[in-house]
Image: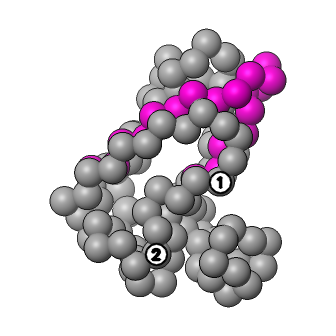
């Protein structure tokens, strides 16, 4: 079973599970919590192939679980449905942006 823990403190693209990782088959839940004192952190969670490049790229095909979702301060989002995918084909990635009040994100991601 996948057990991945990540803290994200910058607005960037993060590989949660890289393509080829054996952990992908055991995902049952992804929890994302907004831990900072800022308004709402904007988050996108998606699968991405390597059509154009191994890193995130506009030419790659993306399949979004959700896009541009604001997670309010002190709140957690739990995704627990339709999480299985072919880890030999796709990366599981998350894009974070600065909070709506301009502050840097402070998110914890737990994948089980």
Depicted 28 relative to depicted 8: above or below: below
Report which quarter residue 71 is drawn in: top right
Residue at position x 53%, y 26% from top?
34
Image-based side of 104 in relation to 7, left or right? right
- Residue bounds of the magenta highlight: 94-112
Q: Which residue is pictured at 33% across the width and 68% down the height? A: 24
Figure check: 92 above or below 103: below
Q: Which mark is residue 95?
A: none
Residue at 36 percent of width and 43 percent of height: 5
Where does residue 33 sit, x and y in percent of width and height? 46, 30
Q: Which residue in the structure is indicated by mark 1?
A: 13
Image quadrant where one finds the N terminus: bottom left
**Outermost top residue:** 37
Question: Where's residue 47, x and y in %?
Answer: 54, 68
Horizontal and vertical percent for residue 40? 66, 25
**CA separation, marks 2 and 1?**
15 Å
Image quadrant where residue 2 sits = bottom left
Q: Which residue is mark 2?
A: 19
Q: Where does residue 52 sit, x and y in percent of width and height?
A: 73, 84
103 or 39: nearer the eye? 103
Res. 61 visible in picture: no
Pointer 2 or 1: first along the chain: 1
| Image-based side of 12 in relation to 100, left or right | left
The magenta stretch spans residue 96: yes
Query: Which residue is at the far bottom?
Result: 51
Q: Is residue 110 magenta?
A: yes
Horizontal side of 51 relative to 93 (left or right) equals right
In the rendered image, the vertical position of residue 24 relative to residue 3, given as above or below: below
Q: Is residue 99 visible?
A: yes
- Element under disc 2: loop
């Amino acid at each position: 079973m996948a057990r991945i823990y990540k803290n994200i403190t910058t607005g960037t693209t993060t590989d949660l599970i890289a393509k080829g990782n054996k952990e992908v088959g055991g995902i049952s839940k992804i929890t994302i919590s907004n831990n900072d004192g800022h308004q709402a952190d904007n988050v996108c969670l998606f699968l991405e192939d390597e059509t154009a490049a191994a890193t995130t790229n506009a030419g790659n095909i993306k399949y979004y679980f959700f896009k541009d979702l604001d997670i309010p301060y002190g709140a957690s989002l739990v995704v627990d449905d339709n999480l299985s995918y072919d880890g030999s084909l796709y990366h599981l990635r998350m894009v974070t942006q600065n909070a709506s009040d301009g502050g840097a994100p402070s998110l914890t991601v737990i994948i089980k």
